């Protein structure tokens, strides 16, 4: 659906994107993560056609995005910092979006009023940050884009509205086959909704895979007893008698080998997205920097 192929971009000699390749499958919910300065926002501005790459290509369904109104009309974008015309009301922006998006659904816009009970006659600039983010979702979801690009989408929303918005996004994927890319620092929240993940650092893609593959190939073994033989241990820490091992392999294989040494206790746990992120960037132990490569 969406592909960045060997994209590089420099600003005044600073290399913001370095031969970046990114692939978002049709109908996927893709989480784009990385530390501050990794290049995520620059990548998003290429995806939405704001920037032209110095080299490489950015395509949506095989069509270039930059200076392509037809491709851009398929993309709904909600940035971290929301901008609307100073005096625009929600109704003003509905007319604006209707002119841009041929797929704009007025009936859906009306139904979403029940979820986003926003003032109709007040300028959006007078809304709180959370209300402005609600307005952005109200308008963008009603546009029914084929590609939804979200940068820190739930920042500023209360917990109830966060859950509601994520539910709406997943419903849109299920009902229409839309594709979603979410950039966020909230890895726990991404883990609940994403099926594919890309980890960026210094303008490059370190790791891109389905979340199931990431969590299925490496596990955390907590054990009280001897270390099972024939395990590929990538990292080990201890707290009293309890040792925690990061082990490459399938859960059933690790469990079988752990049972064989008859430990006083053991448990095999999947790695969280946060743990994958930390280990991939080498923040815990350099020995596991390439944990899933």
Image: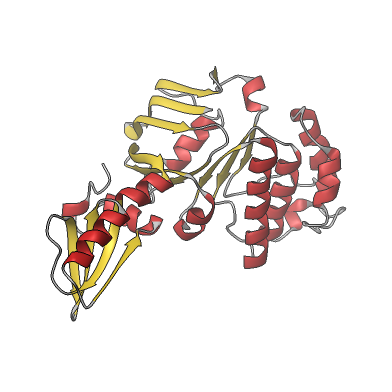
Q: Is residue 284 visible?
A: no
Judge by depth and name the residue closer to the eye, 84 or 181.
181
Above or below residue 84? Residue 239 is below
Q: Is residue 138 left or right of residue 47?
A: right
Picture residue at 28% right of the left edge, 50% below the top: 280
Q: Position of residue 171 (x, y in %)?
A: 68, 47
Picture residue at 86% right of the left edge, 53% below the top: 120
Q: Position of residue 209 (x, y in %)?
A: 39, 40
The number of numbered discs placed on residues in the rendered structure image is 0
Above or below residue 45? Residue 242 is below
Q: Is residue 5 visible?
A: yes
Here the colouring is secondary structure
Picture residue at 70% right of the left edge, 48% below the top: 137
Name the quarter where the N terminus is drawn.
Answer: top right
Q: Position of residue 259 (x, y in %)?
A: 22, 66
Q: Image quarter for residue 231? A: bottom left
Q: Residue furthest bottom?
A: 240
Q: Image quarter for residue 163? A: bottom right
Name the quarter where the C terminus is drawn.
Answer: top left
Judge by depth and name the residue closer to the eye, 239 or 21.
239
Picture residue at 22% right of the left edge, 78% below the top: 264
Q: Is residue 50 left or right of residue 279?
A: right
Above or below residue 160? Residue 191 is above
Q: Position of residue 228 (x, y in %)?
A: 15, 63
Q: Is residue 123 left or right of residue 269?
A: right
Judge by depth and name the residue closer to the eye, 283 or 240.
240
Judge by depth and name the residue closer to the eye, 251 or 20.
251
Q: Image quarter for residue 23? A: top left
């Amino acid at each position: 659906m969406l592909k960045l192929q060997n994209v590089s971009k420099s600003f005044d000699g600073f290399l913001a994107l370095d031969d970046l390749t990114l692939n978002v499958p049709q109908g996927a919910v893709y989480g784009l993560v990385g530390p501050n300065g990794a290049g995520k926002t620059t990548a998003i501005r290429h995806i939405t056609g704001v920037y032209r790459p110095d080299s490489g290509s950015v395509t949506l369904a095989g069509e270039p995005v930059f200076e392509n109104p037809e491709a851009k009309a398929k993309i709904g974008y909600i940035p971290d910092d929301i901008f609307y015309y100073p005096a625009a009301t929600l109704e003003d922006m509905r007319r604006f979006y209707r002119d841009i998006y041929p797929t704009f659904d007025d009936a859906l816009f009306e139904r979403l009023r029940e979820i986003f009970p926003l003032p109709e006659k007040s300028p959006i600039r007078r809304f709180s940050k959370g209300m402005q983010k609600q307005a952005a979702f109200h308008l963008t979801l009603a546009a029914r884009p084929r590609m939804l690009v979200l940068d820190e989408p739930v920042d500023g929303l209360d917990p109830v509205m966060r859950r509601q918005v994520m539910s709406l996004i997943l419903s849109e994927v299920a009902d229409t086959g839309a594709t979603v890319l979410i950039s966020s620092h909230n890895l726990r929240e991404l883990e609940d909704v994403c099926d594919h993940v890309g980890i960026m650092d210094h303008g490059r893609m370190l790791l891109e895979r389905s979340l199931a593959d990431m969590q299925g190939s490496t596990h955390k073994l907590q054990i009280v007893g001897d270390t099972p033989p024939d395990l590929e241990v990538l990292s080990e820490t201890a707290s009293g008698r309890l040792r925690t091992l990061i082990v490459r392999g399938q859960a059933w294989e690790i469990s079988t080998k752990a049972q064989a040494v008859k430990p006083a206790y053991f448990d095999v746990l999947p790695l969280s997205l946060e743990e994958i992120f930390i280990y991939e960037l080498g923040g815990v132990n350099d020995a596991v920097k390439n944990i899933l490569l």
